[in-house]
Image (spheres, rainbow, N blue to C red):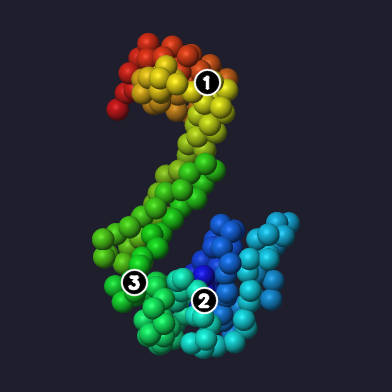
Amino acid sequence: MVVVGAGQVGDRRARALAAAGFQVVWVAPDAPLRPFETTDAGALGALEIRRRAFVDEDLRGCVAVFACAPPVANAAVALAARAAGVLCGRADDAEAGDFVVPAQLERAGAVVSVSTDGAGPSAARTLLRALSAAWRPSFSAFLRLWAETRRELPSGAARRNGARSVANDEILSMLDAGDVEGARARLRASLVAGGEAPAETT
């Protein structure tokens, strides 16, 4: 993967790709010398920084390029990518690229993606800020609780049936009130019951 351009978008994209295990080439005259602090040697090793302007040869051997520079530079990257048969995503003009990367909100245990069907990055960021503001600590606790409880119980039809009938709204309310142990006991009992718990409210 190649990321062209620094700034917030290029920085975020390079970090995310490297953290996901991709081999990343980050091309930007103003790319940081130390892009991020980490104790994960694998993540550091997956990121090569070229502190200079983009050249067509940067695309050699890559599958996709993320153009996160100013519009003129992004247009040049897209042109080179098209000639090289490399997919290109443009941060400034999604319709001019080959793919779109949805805006994402990451919280413990969850990734929420926002795609706006052509409304553009600014609209997506606005929705993402609203979703971020609405995120409650109980949501993260809820996801951790589900993950922990499912690991404790054997898989099978009984657990699947129980999962369908868990009163998730009730469990969230208990977590909002700080009753973590009560929520854990309620969830576990519902899963063990294998479908005998009250149906989830909406």
Q: Amino acid at mark 3?
A: Asp
**Quick one: label 2, few (<14), some, or many (20+) residues within 10 Å?**
few
Dot 3: element: loop
Which one is in front, 81 or 176? 81
| Residue identified by numbered label 3 | 98
Mark 1 closeness class: few <14, some 14–19, many ≥20 residues within 10 Å: few
Q: Earlier in the sequence, mark 3 or mark 2?
A: 2
Q: Which residue is mark 2?
A: 61
Q: Is 160 drawn above or below residue 84 in the view shown?
A: above
Gap between marks 1 and 2 measured at Cα? 45 Å
105 shown above or below 167: below
Give whichever of 167, 3 is nearer the camera. 3
Q: Quick check: can you spot residue 75?
A: no
Of the two numbered discs 3 and 2 in the rendering, the one whose residue sits closer to the viewer: 2
**Residue at which label 1 appears:** 154
At a point 37% along the width and 19% down the height, the residue shown is: 161
The answer to whether residue 119 is left or right of residue 185 is left
